[in-house]
Image (tube, grey):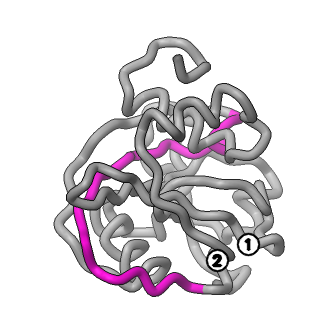
Amino acid sequence: MTSEELFDVVDENDCVVAVMTRREVHRQKLLHRAVHIFVFRDDGRMLIHFRHPDKEEFPSVWTSSASGHVSTGETYRQSAERELTEELGISAPIEFAARVAACPETSHEFTELFVARSSDEIRFDPNEITDIRWVTLDEVRNEVNERPELFSPAFIVLLTAFLGVPSKGVS
């Protein structure tokens, strides 16, 4: 990804108000869009990945199966489909699961969460991901509760929304 990647800047209602470079959007902490995807196997286990230590935000923590910014002119769904291929090397049908308003935990990103089911071999991008694990929802819930610092804040918010837990924690 280049620093000149373009993002739609949005208002508090997620309506596009400008187009700016990734660098400027992040520097100014402007509202923008992102997607996360939870990939599940047939046995119900969910893939989580360990973020590369060179990532700008939240390096070296566990997070969603795949995630990324929505590029200018792209829909949330298009972005989610692209991220599955770019980060994990798979293509699978996706279903909308949750929407989270922009907040500090999501790095000022309106975020849509999608779910995919796939038993395909994962071929992750080593520039984005350094490790992967398949976990049950109970396992990841317990790990997040016991050691939240090991997970990205956005993942915790999205897991909470996905599980339907109203609080900030994952109970």
Residue 57, visible in the rendered structure = no
Question: Would you say 140 lies left or right of 21 here?
Answer: left
Q: Position of residue 109 (x, y in %)?
A: 57, 46
Q: Position of residue 6 (x, y in %)?
A: 58, 73
Question: Quadrant location of the N terminus?
Answer: bottom right
- Residue under the image location 55 percent in, 33 percent down: 157
Q: Judge whether 50 appears above or below 120 on screen.
A: above
Q: Where is residue 8 in the image (x, y as percent from the top left)?
A: 51, 60
- Residue under the image location 67 percent in, 71 percent down: 21
Distance between the alpha carbons at the discs numbered 1 and 2: 5 Å
Residue 2, visible in the rendered structure = yes
Residue of label 1: 52
Q: Quadrant of residue 155?
A: top right
Specify the amino acid type for callout 2: Glu
Question: Would you say 150 lies left or right of 157 here?
Answer: right
Q: Do the residues labelled 1 and 2 touch (CB within 8 Å)?
A: yes
Q: Judge whether 14 appears above or below 23 on screen.
A: above
Between 101 and 163, the one nearer to me in the picture: 163
Question: Would you say 80 lies left or right of 9 here?
Answer: left
- Residue under the image location 60 percent in, 19 percent down: 168
Q: Residues within 10 Å of mark 1 (few under 14, many from 20)?
A: some
Between 56 and 72, the one nearer to me in the picture: 56
Q: Earlier in the sequence, mark 1 or mark 2?
A: 1
- Residue under the image location 77 percent in, 69 percent down: 55
Q: Judge whether 117 appears above or below 124 on screen.
A: above
Q: Where is residue 58 in the image (x, y as percent from the top left)?
A: 77, 55
Magenta highlight range: 104-125
Q: Quadrant of residue 9?
A: bottom right
Residue of label 2: 128
Specify the amino acid type for callout 1: His
Residue 6 colored in magenta in the image: no
Residue 123 colored in magenta in the image: yes
